[in-house]
Amino acid sequence: MPREPTASPEQFIQGAPVLQVQDVLATAAFYRDVLGFDWDFGDEEYCVVWRDNSAIHFARGDGDVSGLHLFQWVRDVDALHEEVTAKGAVVAVELASRSYGVRDFKITDPNGVGLVFGQAID
């Protein structure tokens, strides 16, 4: 697992993927309503959602995201799994402890982007 973000980074503050999607507003609504991300700005062309230290940007494009998935480190993967499934997220890969030292699960967003949420197994 990478080091925790610091309040006073030396250089890099935060990285964020920019996903090209066909419907920016619908995608942002899914991340807000199902995954619990915040969203206070966005239009049909560009939007940013975030939760804690994780930001994801959406830009209008052709929506070709084949082969792409995002991994998000979280503190309590079991609690997040319960939260997002209660809001209707469909689990693509069930929550489990993996042989590589991570407990994780995977969902797919409306654009076909896989989102894997995991935490290190102590």
Image (cartoon, rainbow, N blue to C red):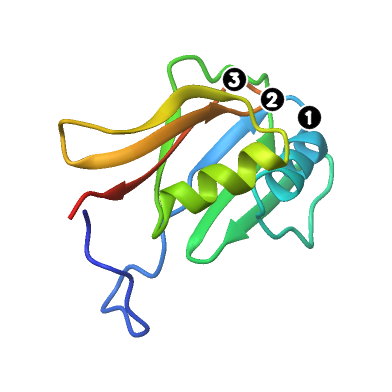
Which circle marks residue 112 in the picture? Answer: 3
Name the kind of residue labelled 3 in the image: Gly
Which circle marks residue 110 in the picture? Answer: 2
Q: Position of 95 compared to 83: left or right? A: left
Q: What is the secondary structure assignment of the residue under circle 1?
A: loop
- Residue reaching furthest to the bottom: 8
Name the kind of residue labelled 2 in the image: Pro
Mark 1 lies on residue = 23
Name the kind of residue labelled 1 in the image: Asp
- CB atoms of marks 2 and 1 within 8 Å: yes
Q: Position of residue 49 (x, y in %)?
A: 65, 54
Q: What is the secondary structure assignment of the residue under circle 3?
A: loop
- 109, 95: nearer the viewer: 95
Q: Position of residue 108 (x, y in %)?
A: 57, 25
Which circle marks residue 102 in the picture? Answer: none
Name the residue at 41% across, 63% down.
14
Q: Residues within 10 Å of mark 3 (few under 14, many from 20)?
A: some
Image quarter hosting the C terminus: bottom left
Q: Is residue 114 above or below residue 121?
A: above
Give the label, 2 or 1, closer to the camera: 2
Q: Position of 9 compared to 58: left or right? A: left
- 78, 119: nearer the viewer: 78
- Mark nearer the N terminus (1 vs 3): 1
Q: Is residue 34 above or below residue 112?
A: below
User: Toward which corner of the image does residue 12 lie, by quadrant?
Assistant: bottom left
- Mark nearer the N terminus (2 vs 1): 1
Using the numbered discs, state the Cα–Cα distance from disc 2 to disc 1 in whole angstroms. 9 Å
- 118, 61: nearer the viewer: 118
User: Toward which corner of the image does residue 104 lie, by quadrant?
Assistant: top left
Q: Position of residue 69 (x, y in %)?
A: 44, 28
Name the residue at 32% across, 78% down.
6
